[in-house]
Amino acid sequence: MIANLAADVQAFTSNVFLVEGDRTVLVDPGANFDVVERIRARTDDLDAVVLTHTHRDHVGNLEAVTDAFDVDVWGYDPAIEGVDHAIGDDERVTLGSDEYVALHTPGHKDDHLCFYAEDRGILFAGDLVFQNGSFGRTDLPEGDRETLIESIDRVLERISPDLSEMHTGHGPSVTTDPYDHVQLAARMARQA
């Protein structure tokens, strides 16, 4: 079960995905709203926090979540404050009841990860790509358009054309032909 706890939040935040199952995991705690209350409305137990990347809108609520649930935080770079454990490129992690492969996808930010569950056809895309061919900003520190294009291409090589769900860092999740949205983002990033 995947729920976006920030779906109706009007504040500046990322999407916040609670992935329930054998291992209940929060993907990106977001910022500027009471995410702890929203987690507690669904579960009493959180096993871990996993980060797609450490931009402020994705991690502003991190300390509140770790204080409330006494959980460790997993991300690409444990040298960054708040990240307890590294998730390496191509490392496998369990989110909910499914195994995902972590894909290091810099270009928007150096520590950016996407998570792909091949068996279920689910992609957590973070801020790499979004609905309708949008893609992550490259005008922020650590942003680089060519690197972003390489990362999108890498994800396209790994995911199946039968991808069933794409959960993005902002905007709605894509459940109708999400692979096509990733392909479009690869084309749009080259044109912009």
Image (spheres, grey):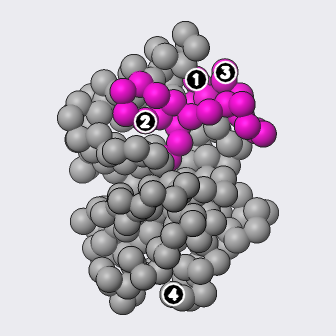
Quarter of the image containing the N terminus?
Answer: bottom left
Q: Residues within 10 Å of mark 4 (few under 14, many from 20)?
A: some
Per the rendered image, the range of residues in magenta is 126-151
Q: The disc labelled 3 sits on which kind of residue?
A: Glu
Q: Residues within 10 Å of mark 2 (few under 14, many from 20)?
A: many
CA separation in Å, label 1 and label 2: 14 Å
Foreground mark, 2 or 3, reads: 2
Q: Which is more N-terminal, label 4 or label 1?
A: 4
Residue identified by numbered label 3: 146
Q: Which is more N-terminal, label 2 or label 1?
A: 2
Q: The disc labelled 4 sits on which kind of residue?
A: Phe
CA separation in Å, label 4 and label 3: 39 Å
Which label is found at residue 149?
A: 1
Residue identified by numbered label 2: 130
In the image, residue 89 sits, relative to residue 65, either above or below, namely above
Q: Which is more N-terminal, label 4 or label 2?
A: 4
In the image, residue 135 sits, relative to residue 57, either above or below, namely above
CA separation in Å, label 3 and label 1: 5 Å
Residue sitting nearer the eye, 112 or 58? 58
In the image, residue 32 sits, relative to residue 15, either above or below, namely below
The residue that appears at 66% across and 57% down in the rendered structure is 56
Question: Are discs 3 and 1 less than 8 Å apart at CB?
Answer: yes
Left or right position of 137 against 166: right
Q: Please tell me in which quadrant of the rendered image residue 2 appears.
A: bottom left
Q: Which is more N-terminal, label 3 or label 4?
A: 4
Q: The disc labelled 2 sits on which kind of residue?
A: Phe
Provide the secondary structure element on which disc 4 rests.
Answer: helix
Residue sitting nearer the eye, 13 or 135? 13
The residue that appears at 51% across and 30% down in the rendered structure is 135
